[in-house]
Image (cartoon, rainbow, N blue to C red):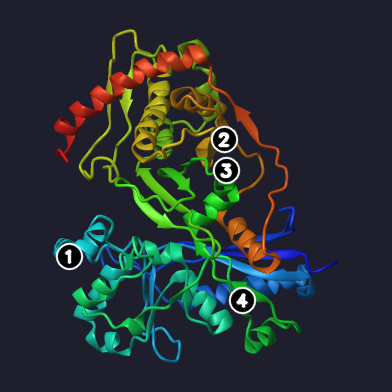
Amino acid sequence: MSASVYVGLDIGTTSIKVAAVTKQLETVFEKQYAYDYLVPQKGWTEIKPDTWGELVIKGLKELFQQVPAETVAGIGITGQMHTTVFVDEHGLSVRPAIMWNDNRTKSSLSEIKQRLESKAETVHLAKIVSTGSPLANLLWVKEHEPEQYQQINKFLIAKDYVKLKLTGTYTTDYCDASTSSLYDLHADCWSEEVQELFDLPRSFFPDIRPASTIIGELTKEICRELNIESTIPVVSGTGDNVASVLISGGFENMQPLVSLGTSGVVVIPNAHHQLKQIGKNVVAKLTDEDEAIITQGTVQSGAKINSWWMEKILRTKNYTKEQEEIPLTLLGENEVLFFPHMNGEKTLFADPNLKGAFIGLGLETRRAEMYLAVLEGLAFGIRQLFLSLKNDEAPQYFTIVGGGAKSELWIKIFANVLGYPIKRIQTSQEAVHGAAILAMMGVEGSFVFPKSDAQVIPPDPVISAKYNQRYENYLKLSQHLRLFGGEES
C-alpha cells in the first residue's frame, strides 16, 4: 500500500475521534475514545489537557496496529473551539484547561464588554465575547490565580495543545483565533488594542497559520512511543465548525449548510471575507490564498425539539411511526404554528428568556397537526435565521447534516419552507473527516472531492407557495412572543 492514507483527529467535548481515510474518503480506521471533564464547582467545566494527549497516543497506537505507519502521509486535527489551555515555558499546563461551556466568567462579562466598546477597533468583539471565550478565561486566571498567571508562556486552544505534544510547536489557526475575542477581524491578526486594554503580553499569543499548513512533524519521542520508524507531518488544523463545513463541501461551491443537531446551526460561507452584522464571523483561511469567511447563527433548541415532543410529551421513541401518521397533504395547510425558541435565542433576538409556544389550536387539532407544527417551527426559525445571514447571491441549494437530516419528512419540509433544493449526503461526514482533508491539502497541495451519492430533494412550487404564507404568520407570531415571553432586543 502506498503512502496515501490520511489521519484526522477530533478533540471533542467528551470524546476524541481518530479516523484514517484514503484520498477517496474511504474510511480504513475509525474509533472514538470517551472521557469525562471536571466540574470542580457549579458552572465550572475544566479538564487536565494531558487527558487529550494520552487518548490521542492510545488512538494512534491502535491505528498503526491496523494501518502501516509508512502508508500514512499526514495528520490533520480539529476540535472544540474556545477551550483554553495555559502553558508555561516548558510547554506544561499550569492549571486545568477552562472549557468552552464553562460559565465562571458570567459576572465579569458586562465589564469586559464595556471595555471592548470603549475603542472603535474593538467594538465588534464586544458582540461575540461570551463565557468560555479565551479572552474571558485569560482574564479570570489573571484576576483569581495570579501565581498561575505569572507562569503562562502561551495560551492555546484544545487542538493546539495536542499539536504541541505531537510536534513541539506553538501554533493556532485562523478559525480558533478569530473566535477568541482577542483577534481583529478587520485587520486579520491578533488585536493589539485588546492586548493594551487588558494588559495582556504579546508573548502569550501563538503564531496563526492557515488550517492546511504543515506546522511540524511527529517528534522522535512520539515516534518511539508509537513504535513507528518514519515521522509524519502534521497540519495546523481548524475548529470543528469549519471542519464540518469543509467535509460537507460547503467551501467547494460556497453554499449554505444547516446542521440539525442538538442545536440548529446555519452556516453561510463566502469567499470574499464578507463580515456580517448578525451572526458570528469565523475566518476559515484553509490556505494562504483563501479569504473564506463563514458566518454562523444558531436556533438553540434545534433538533432537540423533536426528541422533546416525542419522548417527553408523546412518551414514545417510534419517530418513524409518528411521522408516517402525518399526511403529506397537510404540508403547507397546517393551521397550528409552533415557536421553536424553547431555551432562549442568541443570534437574532439576543434574549435568553425566550420560550416556545403553540398557537392556532382548535378542538379539532390532533397530534399529527401538533407534531407537524413542531417540525415546521424549526424550519421557519432556520429560514428567519438564514435570511438574516445570507450572502448577496441567492443559494443554489442547502446542504443539511446532523441527526435531524435522517428524517425524510423533515427534509421535505425544509425544502419547501426554504424554497430551495436540499442536498443530503448519504455517507458519513464528520469534523474528523474534515481534519483528514486538511492533511491531504497540506501534503498534496490540493483536494478534489470524489463523487458522492448525495440525495437532492427539490421543493414543490405549490407547497412552497403555501409555506410562504405560513411563514408570514410565523413572523407575526415571533414578534408577539418576543414581547410576551422574553425581553425585547
The quadrant of the picture occupied by the N terminus is: bottom right
Report if the CB atoms under discs 2 and 3 are less than 8 Å apart: no
Q: Which residue is drawn at 50% across and 63% down?
A: 238
Closer to the observer: label 4 or label 1?
1
Front residue of 277/145: it is 277
User: Could you tell me the amino acid type at mark 1?
Assistant: Lys
273 to the left or right of 39: right
Real-space CA distance between mark 3 and mark 4, rounded to the nearest whole angstrom: 36 Å
Residue at the spot of label 2: 406
- Closer-to-camera residue (191/470): 191
Measured as percent of width and height from the top left, residue 210 is found at 52, 67
Image x and y of residue 222, in percent: 63, 84
Instruction: Please state if 383 lies on the left or on the right of 166 as rendered.
Output: left
**Residue labelled with disc 4:** 57
Question: Which callout, 2 or 4, points at the residue further toward the start of the chain?
Answer: 4
Callout in the foreground (1, 2): 1
In three-dimensional space, the C-alpha distance between marks 2 and 3, rounded to whole angstroms, equals 23 Å
Sequence-earlier tag: 1 or 3: 1
